[in-house]
Image (cartoon, helix red, strand yellow):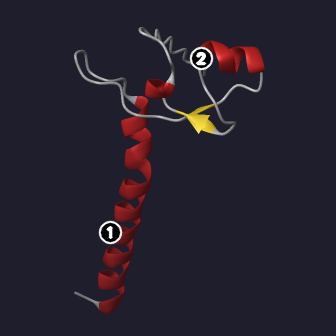
Amino acid sequence: MKKGVKELLILLLLILVVFTLVHYPVVAATKPPAPGTVLPQFQLVVPEDSGAKAYLGLSGSDEFTIPEIKAQVVVIQILSRY
């Protein structure tokens, strides 16, 4: 194999690997959880409104996770915007 062709193939392989590594998390994150599985852990921004913070039982002003909400039942409605 000629040196130029070999270098081109290595470059194309490298581009493919980088594209796969960058693109895979985006694709994985766009698929909804399968029925019967656990919702993945994610961070939400604490509301600025003190009434909303009190309603959720949150303290602090940064981010929180769903288990930090002080409630017996938490209903999550996920909306999709395109």
Q: In which quadrant will I find the C terminus?
A: top right
Cβ–Cβ under 8 Å for marks 2 and 1: no
**Residue hosting label 2:** 56
Q: Quadrant of residue 16?
A: bottom left
Q: Is residue 40 above or below residue 14?
A: above
Q: Picture coordinates of residue 79 (x, y %)?
A: 55, 14
Going from N to C along the chain, the mark reached first, 2 or 1, is 1
Q: Is residue 61 above or below residue 37?
A: below
**Residue hosting label 1:** 13
**Of 73 and 5, the residue lying toward us:** 73
Q: Is residue 45 above or below residue 6?
A: above
**Left or right of residue 52: residue 8:** left
Q: Picture coordinates of residue 62 (x, y %)?
A: 66, 39
Q: Is residue 21 above or below residue 52?
A: below
Element type where label 2 sits in the image:
helix
Marker disc for residue 4: none
Instruction: Residue at 47% x, 12% y: name it.
Output: 71
Assess disc 2: are there few (<14), some (14-19) or many (≥20) residues with their C-alpha within 10 Å of its C-alpha. some
**Left or right of residue 80: residue 49:** right
Instruction: Residue at 38% x, 57% y: name it.
Output: 21
Assess disc 1: are there few (<14), some (14-19) or many (≥20) residues with their C-alpha within 10 Å of its C-alpha. few
Instruction: Residue at 69% x, 36% y: name it.
Output: 61
CA gap, disc 2 and disc 1: 49 Å
Q: In which quadrant will I find the N terminus?
A: bottom left
Element type where label 1 sits in the image:
helix
Q: Quadrant of residue 6?
A: bottom left
